[in-house]
Image: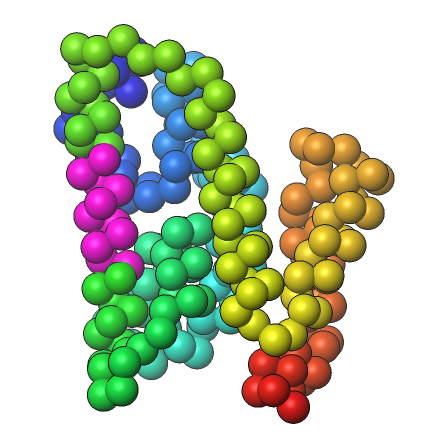
Amino acid sequence: MNEAGYSVFWSVIAALFIYAGSMQIVMVSLLTAGAPVLAVAVMTFFINARHIFYGVGFIDRFRKMGWKYPYMVLTLTDETYSVLCSVDYEVGLDREKTDFFIALIDHCYWMLGCFLGGCMGQFLPWNTAGIEFSATAFFLVVVINQWQQYPSKIPFFTGIISSVIFYCLLGADNFLIPSLSVSLIVLLVLRDRVALRMEGA
């Protein structure tokens, strides 16, 4: 943002309303190129489409939270999803309040990070070569955590098989959305079996 001529204020505003790291990065080049709003909206949808699949499993859980529901939808990022899937609630703890504060604190951390990054970007030179591997490492940690924590391996194998098939058919740039779509359909069909395995049946 700093290199594109935008102040720290705009970095924080982007973190507040966009709250999607990949899209915030792409947004900078779209802004500097003067891209139309429709193009930005379409690009945003495809870049963040995976969040739709994350959210399917949380619809009922979030809907019970009343006025917090829209905010929980906005803040369901990769990191928040991972925490909400693995959180171990203590007995007597208000789960809805806990979920809300997990999402809120994640969001605040993100805005703080964008603020500090915007400030530091004005004074310090950065070589970001290789930083893209951090996203790959994060997803590997999420996959390993899911494998270890949940008794049903159906979601894992569904995701792996559909990803490999569409990667071979469509290539690295186009496989994600079709593989997520097929995985969702398969898991919806097999949801009762997955639920039984999760309960240890």
- Residue 111 seen from this side: yes
Quarter of the image where one finds residue 30: top left
Q: What stretch is highlighted in magenta?
A: 103-113
Q: Residue at x 52, y 69 (%)?
A: 149
Residue 152 percent coordinates (x, y): 65, 74
Above/below status of 146 relative to 22: below
Q: Is the magenta stretch mostly helix, strand or loop?
A: helix
The colour mode here is: rainbow
Residue at 54 percent of width and 38 percent of height: 136
Q: In terms of depth relative to the viewer, which is nearer, 116 or 87?
A: 87
Q: Residue pushed farthest bottom?
A: 201
Instruction: Answer with the quarter of the image where residue 46 lies.
Output: top right
Left or right for 201, reference 145: right
Task: Tell me residue 50's x, y (percent).
Answer: 54, 51
Residue lying farthest front? 148
In percent of the image, x 39 and y 51: which residue is there? 79
Quadrant housing residue 7: top left
Q: In which quarter of the image is the C terminus?
A: bottom right
Whether residue 88 sits left or right of residue 175 in the image: it is: left
| Magenta-colored stretch includes residue 43 | no
- Residue 45 shows up from this direction: no
Residue 99 horizontal/vertical position (percent): 29, 69
- 126 w.r.t. 132: above or below: above
Residue 74 location (% of width, % of height) = 34, 55
Residue at the location (29% across, 20% down)? 1
Q: How many marks?
A: 0
